[in-house]
Image (cartoon, rainbow, N blue to C red):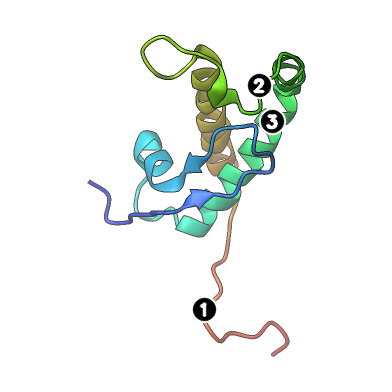
Amino acid sequence: MHSRKCSHWLASHDPFWPRIHLGALREQLELPAQVSDARLEVAALGAVRHVGQLFAHWRKDLRALGYRRLDDVSASGGQSRLTGSYLRAVRVRTRQALHSGLHIVECRSGARGDE
């Protein structure tokens, strides 16, 4: 079990797409505690933006059919295949970003960049 427990949602760039819970993403990716919450959040935000661009045709077509959110697409037994595909793509892209050498330096409270 990981000692870090991120418990907030990633702010999505487009409310059409499902929200990403960073704690669940951390667990799904089985990240070590050394991966900071800030690093995970930056990687996930980039992943959400990238995947949203890749899946823009889904969004356009589904919006034309009257769906306001991807989660509104009916699914038998819970999550739709489209939602599952979107979430898998976000996980894959997040993992790629984390392994690409992305380094995030967390600022300490009260630290000033002009000193």
Q: Which x, y percent locates residue 84?
A: 49, 20
Residue 2 seen anywhere in this rendered image of the structure = yes
Q: Residue at x 53, y 54 (%)?
A: 39
Secondary structure found at label 3: helix
Residue tagged by mark 2? Answer: 67
Dot 3 crowding, Cα within 10 Å, few <14, some 14–19, many 20+ = many
Which dot, 1 or 2, sits closer to the camera? 2
Q: Which mark is residue 47?
A: none
Q: Which x, y percent locates residue 50?
A: 70, 33
Amino acid residing under circle 3 = Gly
Dot 2 crowding, Cα within 10 Å, few <14, some 14–19, many 20+ = some
Which dot, 1 or 3, sits closer to the camera? 3
Closer to the N terminus: mark 1 or mark 2? 2
- Left or right of 72, for residue 79: left
Residue tagged by mark 1? Answer: 108
Q: Which x, y percent locates residue 104?
A: 58, 59
Q: Residue at x 37, y 34 (%)?
A: 28
Closer to the N terminus: mark 2 or mark 3? 3
